[in-house]
Amino acid sequence: MIPDKIISAIKKYDTIIIHRHVRPDPDAYGSQVGLKEIISDSFPHKKVFAVGEEEPSLNFLAKMDDIEDEMYHHALVIVCDTANAARICDQRYNLGADLIKIDHHPNVDKYGEIMWVDTSASSTCELIYDLYLYAKDDGFQLNDRAAMLIYAGIVGDTGRFLFPSTSKKTFQHAAELVTYDFDRSRLYEGIYNIQDNIARLRGYILQHFELSESGMSSIRLTREELEEFNVDPADSGQLIGVLGDIEGIQAWVFFIEEDDQIRVRLRSKGPVVNDIAAKYNGGGHPMAAGASVKTWEEADNVVDDLQEACIAYSN
């Protein structure tokens, strides 16, 4: 089985470097650093690193390691929670001796000598816990910090267990993880507390979103609007789910203007959206996907495609 191959590779290498995707979320950090904690605690003699750009909003979970290129020589590289090689944070991932992909997104970009991709998993953190369960008999250990990180990723990617990806196994894993010693209240605060400027932008979104008869909704956040609320484009990702509780909305899209592109965030309660994202340099899950466009005219095309998907879903 693939987990057995991953376990064998981890046991084989003395240096292991773990990557994740750009613009990380709790599942990216949780799977990356949670796996680092498991390996480090299980094999104290191994050198294990988690690399990538820091994400200030997730510093309460972990800090990244800063390593030289030479560390990749004869190293095992593991990439967590990243469907496309182009989205791997720190492109030195290909300098290692072996490469493993662990992910729960559709396997569109097949990179790595070993690929463990399970789209039925709620999160990559769920897979990391699966890996630990596979490896317990091989001496792998799970400490409190690893449990906290894995739990954080599961909570983040399931929307606190509300998303359809949440399964019986997800709840079983969560039930086991909460038996470890970590502060769940503090963890939830770190993930979900927002600053007042983000809250004010949320109010603006609720006042200005558009909703069509088909159940398609869209919102556009220009650079001027983001500056008005003093919100960095990267932080606006905290607001993507704000339309999810509104009656009548089947699927929605956020357009977030950055310096060199317009970020596209697609969410759905039914219509498939990752095939739309794939048309615009993106991808993701059937109900949650991302992409990017260069102009507002292209953004109009995304709206048209999402409108068609909502109409087809309703018929």
Image: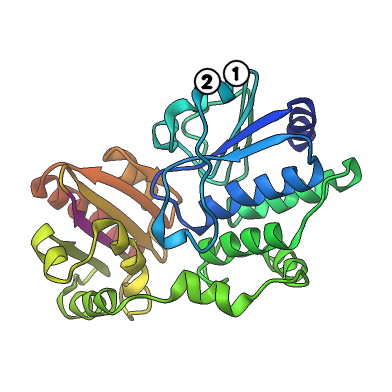
| Camera-side residue of 248 and 158 | 158
Badge 2 crowding class, 10 Å Cα cut-off, few under 14, some 14 to 19, many 20 or more, is some
Quarter residue 201 falls in: bottom left
Badge 1 crowding class, 10 Å Cα cut-off, few under 14, some 14 to 19, many 20 or more, is few
Tell me how far mark 2 sits from mark 1, CA to CA.
7 Å
Label 1 secondary element: loop
46 sits to left or right of 25: right
Check disc 2 and give the amino acid type.
Leu
Q: Give the residues in magenta.
A: 252-258
Q: Which quadrant of the figure contains the N terminus?
A: top right
Q: Is residue 253 magenta?
A: yes
Quarter residue 307 falls in: bottom left
In the rendering, at what x and y percent does residue 6 appear? 73, 33
221 sits to left or right of 7: left
Q: Main secondary structure of the magenta part?
A: strand
Q: Which residue is mark 2?
A: 95
Q: Given contact means CB atoms under 8 Å apart, are the residues at marks 2 and 1 in contact? A: yes
In the rendering, at what x and y percent does residue 297 appear? 8, 47
Instruction: Give the residue at x 53% y 52%.
Output: 29
Instruction: Give the residue at x 37% y 79%.
Output: 245
On the question of residue 120 being in view, the answer is: no
Q: Which residue is mark 1?
A: 73
Instruction: Give the residue at x 19% y 65%.
Output: 219
Label 2 secondary element: helix
Question: Which of the labelled discs sits on residue 45, or is there none?
Answer: none
Check disc 1 and give the amino acid type.
His
Q: Which quadrant of the figure contains the C terminus?
A: bottom left
In the rendering, at what x and y percent does residue 73 appear? 60, 18
In the rendering, at what x and y percent does residue 85 appear? 45, 31
